[in-house]
Image (cartoon, helix red, strand yellow):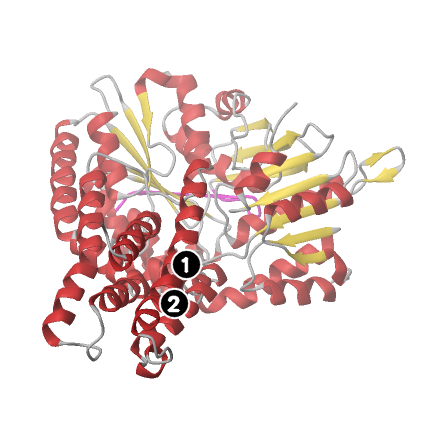
Amino acid sequence: MLSIFSLLLISISIFWLIRSAKIILFWVYLWQLKDYHIPRFLAHFQTEKGRQILLSKLRFLKIILLLCFLSSNIILFFHDAFASTVFLPLILLVLYSLESIRTIKGFIQRKLKMPVFTKKTMPILGLIFILFTLCPLFLWQKIQQTAFIYNYPPLLKFCFSLLLIDILSPIILSLLILSFQPLTVLLRNQILKKAKLKRKKLKDLLVIGITGSYGKTSTKEFLYTILAEKFGKNKIVKTSKHQNSEIGISQCILRDIKPEHKIFICEMGAYMKGGIKLLCNIAKPKIGILTGINQQHLATFGSQEKIVKTKFELIKSLPENGIAILNGNNKHIISELATINKTIKTGIKKLYSIKEKKDIWAEDINVQKEKVLFKVFSKDGDSANFIINLLGSRSIENILAATVCAKELGMSLNEISKACEKIEPIHGLGKLIKEQNGLNIIDATYSANPDSVISHLNYLKVWNHETIRGVECKKIIIMPCLIELGNTAKHIHQKIGGKIGEICDLAIITTKEYFDEIKNSAVESGMDKKNILFIENPETILKKIKTFCRVGDIILLESRAPKKVIKNLTKTK
């Protein structure tokens, strides 16, 4: 029969393995989410949630327990040798069994954070699991050989090994994940090489590159809809959602582009200098659209200047017969263009604006609840009225960017205007949803940046005089603090807070790091401090909405609001 020591060892090991599966999946998920980009990964731990991962109460409890293992006084507290040996392992057994129950429950309820499983990540994930679970055995063997931690019994030494590996798991797993990067880079380079070879053979393919700190996805979708009216959908291909990295673009070229395609609309994103240039070397765009530049991802780039230089890599990569299309409203673009204008080899540069008369511009803007009306003019004398079924004036800039491109490809403003009538709002990109309980929901959860948040808040002004039975509708925003803004974060959140205080009746902020900046600025702008709240729990948020809101009120869901809140509020009738 197995001894009590053997049963304890087996039980603790099983529970440790179960909870380790959750930890491994989470850290692989986090690295994958951050594109295995070390600055982006480290920037995550500047957020409140990131700090909670490393500085949790559970981690401190385990550190205290580890110190107990190391303390001969604790071990000798019991005069009985048996009690001294099983006391701390029993505590560890209870701890790991509770963690295992939470892991199993999270798996059943589909609440575990898990990476995207692909043919390439699955074997790597399996190897990481094997290597990580072998770490305690390796450490235990070393301890046995060196008689470490005095002359403790084997059970205590094994428990010490499990606990130490557990506490150091963020470092160990990160090193294991990064150790596979040379192999990943090798596979990545093969994919890039194949994509470049295929692209080289597609001599008649017109590539339109789109980059910027914001507006890339919207501009891509608008342009696709417009050009499909002239060339047909079977002649056009575009990168899909989140497919704006070197791997995503390469896979799109290899899998999606067929001989019949004539136009490739390619969204381009980057987190470091040289990133856009790399994408241009793969896709070879002839037309480049720069939608706008702000502080987005400042924490990973390091400076605003590097962001500007990186975005302009698209413009500098265009051929001499290429066409550069730029946002004439954006101060960073105008400033950089004035500096490098003579060094850009591309022959045609087109600017669009809603403030000045550039190559293409908009006037007579009329923002309504579910559409925006404006008139577009071009320097060649062409003009047309536009009616777009989108929310707020923010979309006008992206429509103008797509309009410049379509006009350069032979479409008149009247043709473009008619094509724009087919543009439909997209979930996550500012879609208005009539919720089943009579609330109006704006789903702007795809991504967020300082300009888009301010724009969405300004749109809420359209609802200022909307009434239900004589009572003016209330305006609510639910959002987390923005991330990766570097040393501009406090100022940006103060600005957002001021705008919230000016417009909203209730604000629920779901992350803590810059809540004070938002709250203080909102109160200064006239908001009642009891109506700007920090709430993390989705159930509590939904309960607050239920008690605060009436039929006809409007709720702005911004950025990565809690999934349960998004799912609950965006249910249609």
Label drawn at residue 296: none
> Residue 310's spot in the image, x, y percent?
31, 55
Pick whichever, 105 or 449, lies toward us. 105
Residue sitting at x 12%, y 48%: 183
Q: Quadrant of residue 524?
A: bottom right
- Label 2 secondary element: helix
Q: Do the CB atoms of the residues marked 2 and 1 lie less than 8 Å apart? A: yes
The residue that label 1 is drawn on is 95
- Label 1 secondary element: helix
> Label 1 is placed on what type of residue?
Leu
Pick whichever, 444 or 550, lies toward us. 550
Q: Eyeballing the image, is 395 above or below 257?
A: below
Residue sitting at x 36%, y 76%: 68
> Residue 534's spot in the image, x, y percent?
63, 58
Q: Eyeballing the image, is 452 above or below 516?
A: above
Q: Eyeballing the image, is 166 above or below 190?
A: below
Residue sitting at x 26%, y 31%: 252
The residue that label 2 is drawn on is 62
